[in-house]
Image (spheres, rainbow, N blue to C red):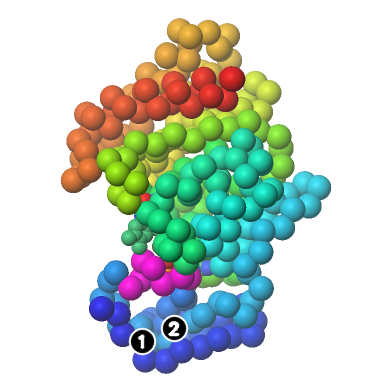
């Protein structure tokens, strides 16, 4: 059970950031769904609800998703349902149930860099940057590698480059975490292959992406790309599945996702 000593509803991001950095136990709240599973003793709980971070906005060049946007918004938003074959909506629609998706937020998910995340895998297949209050704008893959300390994720910004994309995952039941998830995207000859929930954090399979980008895209080369991806990334064992099982199903999921993008 978590305990919360004080509660703050800041008017500005700077105020929220200063509060966060005032004391180690001060904590930013997203939807609170993950925090409440732990036993953290929170000094001041910092609620970002007044900062207008709960919108999905589309411009000519970008789609911007605020940190307080929920997975349910991502799932049902008319723009995201179409954008890049609806990959983001597809990625979140199987996460537990509507009640959880109504509270789990984009900012918390991306900032926390959860290995099991379906959403991060899909985001990584797009041309995505994250905006942090102090550290500023950075590419999602760089942020996933480095993380950030005591910062606040403000929004996720996706460049509307025109990628076609597909998301696939394997889970034992709808309410369970994915055993593995895969996202693939294509922009002309440039392919990206991503594998997440390995159970390590989602990562780009660079060799497989490069191979696909230069290939003739026949059945054989798609199979070869999936094999390369399964060899270049590391897989691990946990209660959901073994390293060997994950490696095996990765080839099937990558192949399926590439074929979906080609279709
Ligand atoms: C039972 C359960 C099952 C789940 N299953 C899946 C699944 O199958 N697939 C999947 O992809 N996800 C799954 N999730 C994760 C879920 O999708 C969210 O990623 C998770 O709940 C975090 O969102 P939240 O808003 O609840 O975060 P919170 O619990 O509010 O916060 C989580 C952490 O993020 C920090 N934080 C919050 N907002 C910000 C911000 N803007 N900037 C910086 N730090 C911030 C908080 O301080 C905290 O440390 C599951 C979660 C739960 C509770």
* In the depicted structure, whether residue 220 falls above or below residue 76: above
Which numbered marker is on residue 190? none
The picture places residue 43, in percent across and down from the top left corner, at 38, 87
Q: Secondary structure at mark 1?
A: strand
Q: Quadrant of ligand 1?
A: bottom left
Residue 132 visible in image: no
State whether label 2 is within 8 Å of ligand 1. no
Do the CB atoms of the residues marked 2 and 1 lie less than 8 Å apart? Answer: yes
Please give the range of residues in magenta: 30-36
- Mark 2–mark 1 Cα distance, whole angstroms, equals 6 Å
Residue 252 or residue 138, whichever sits in front: 252
* Left or right: 44 as drawn, with respect to 140: left
Inspect the magenta stretch and tell me whether residue 169 lies in it: no
Q: At 48% across and 48% down in the image, what residue appears?
A: 93
- The disc, 2 or 1, on the residue closer to the chain's N-terminal end is 1
Residue 86 visible in image: yes
* Left or right: 234 as drawn, with respect to 253: left
* In the depicted structure, whether residue 80 falls above or below residue 27: above
Q: Which residue is mark 1?
A: 4
Q: At 49% across and 35% down in the image, what residue appears?
A: 167
Q: At 55% across and 86% down in the image, what residue appears?
A: 9
The picture places residue 37, in percent across and down from the top left corner, at 29, 69
Question: Which of the 4 quarters of the picture holds residue 203?
Answer: top left
Q: At 77% across and 46% down in the image, what residue appears?
A: 61
Q: Which residue is mark 2?
A: 45
State whether label 1 is within 8 Å of ligand 1. no
- Considering every residue shown, the one lying at the far right of the view is 60
């Amino acid at each position: 059970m978590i305990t919360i000593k004080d509660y703050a509803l800041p008017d500005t991001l700077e105020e929220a950031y200063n509060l966060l950095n005032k004391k180690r136990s001060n904590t930013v709240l997203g939807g609170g769904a993950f925090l409440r599973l732990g036993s953290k003793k929170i000094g001041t709980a910092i609620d970002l609800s007044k900062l207008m971070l709960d919108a999905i906005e589309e411009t000519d060049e970008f789609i911007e998703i605020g940190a307080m946007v929920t997975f349910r918004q991502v799932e049902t938003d008319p723009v995201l349902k179409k954008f890049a074959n609806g990959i983001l909506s597809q990625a979140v629609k199987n996460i537990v149930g509507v009640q959880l998706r109504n509270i789990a937020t984009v900012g918390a998910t991306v900032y926390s860099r959860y290995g099991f995340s379906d959403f991060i895998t899909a985001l990584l297949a797009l041309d995505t940057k994250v905006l942090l209050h102090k550290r500023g704008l950075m590419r999602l893959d760089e942020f996933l590698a480095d993380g950030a300390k005591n910062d606040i994720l403000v929004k996720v910004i996706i460049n509307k480059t025109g990628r076609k994309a597909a998301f696939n995952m394997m889970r034992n039941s709808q309410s369970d975490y994915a055993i593995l998830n895969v996202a693939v995207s294509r922009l002309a000859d440039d392919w990206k292959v991503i594998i997440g929930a390995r159970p390590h954090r989602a990562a780009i399979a660079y060799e497989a992406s490069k191979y696909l980008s230069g290939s003739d895209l026949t059945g054989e080369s798609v199979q070869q790309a999936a094999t390369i991806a399964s060899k270049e990334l590391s897989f691990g064992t946990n209660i959901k599945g073994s390293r060997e099982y994950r490696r095996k199903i990765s080839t099937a999921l990558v192949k399926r996702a590439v074929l979906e993008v080609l279709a």
